[in-house]
Amino acid sequence: MSQHLQTNLEQGKARIVDAPASAPHATVRHQVDVDRNFELPVDLYAATAGLYLAFLAVMLAGFATGGLIIPIAICAVLVVAIFGVPAIWTRLKDNNSKPMSLGQFAHKGIMTNTGHCSARDAAVQMLILPVLIILWACACVTIAALV
């Protein structure tokens, strides 16, 4: 059960103590090692970002009007930011984890929450949505051209 600290202080059951003195040369020690890159190869992230940008290019080419330049540019900036900020995040100080190379990824695969995935399965899972979005853009442009 939770208790109010003020009540404990008033009854004398709790006491306030000073914080322990730390050595002036002591460094902060983090208890948890942070993996900011999920161990996946950089090439998979670059392919995903490229496919999203290709979607925007297909839509811009298919529906080329002056009114779409600004919305497409805004979307392109957002895609670059969505993939650029985490890329900067992985290069922060005290990040000791490194992504796997494509060779290591192909040889070892990757451990996921549901178990081990081969490199092919993980790549398919990661790239299926961007590829489907590209196909959807091609279908939209084709339908618009034929109608």
Image: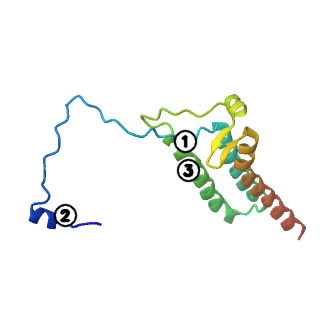
Residue 108: x %, y % from top left: 69, 32
Dot 1 crowding, Cα within 10 Å, few <14, some 14–19, many 20+: some
**Label 2: which secondary element:** helix
Q: Based on the displayed image, in which of its 4 quarters is residue 100 positioned?
A: top right
User: Which residue is found at the position 16% from the left and 37% from the top?
Assistant: 21
Mark 3 — residue? 81
Query: Disc 3 vs disc 1: Cβ atoms closer than 8 Å?
Result: no
* Marks 1 and 2, the one that precedes in the sequence: 2
Residue 26: x %, y % from top left: 25, 30
**Label 1: which secondary element:** helix
**Label 3: which secondary element:** helix
Figure check: 140 above or below 80: below
State the CA–CA distance, disc 3 to disc 1.
Answer: 9 Å
Mark 2 — residue? 5
The N terminus lies in quadrant? bottom left
Figure check: 45 above or below 71: above
* Marks 3 and 1, the one that precedes in the sequence: 3
In the image, taking residue 69 as reference, residue 5 lies left or right, namely left
State the CA–CA distance, disc 3 to disc 2.
Answer: 45 Å
Name the mark nearer the viewer: 3 or 2.
2
User: Which residue is found at the position 55% from the left and 40% from the top?
Assistant: 37
* Marks 3 and 2, the one that precedes in the sequence: 2
**Front residue (pair 134, 117):** 117
Dot 3 crowding, Cα within 10 Å, few <14, some 14–19, many 20+: few
Dot 2 crowding, Cα within 10 Å, few <14, some 14–19, many 20+: few
**Front residue (pair 77, 47):** 47
State the CA–CA distance, disc 1 to disc 2.
Answer: 44 Å
Residue type pointed to by label 3: Ala
Mark 1 — residue? 87
Residue type pointed to by label 2: Leu
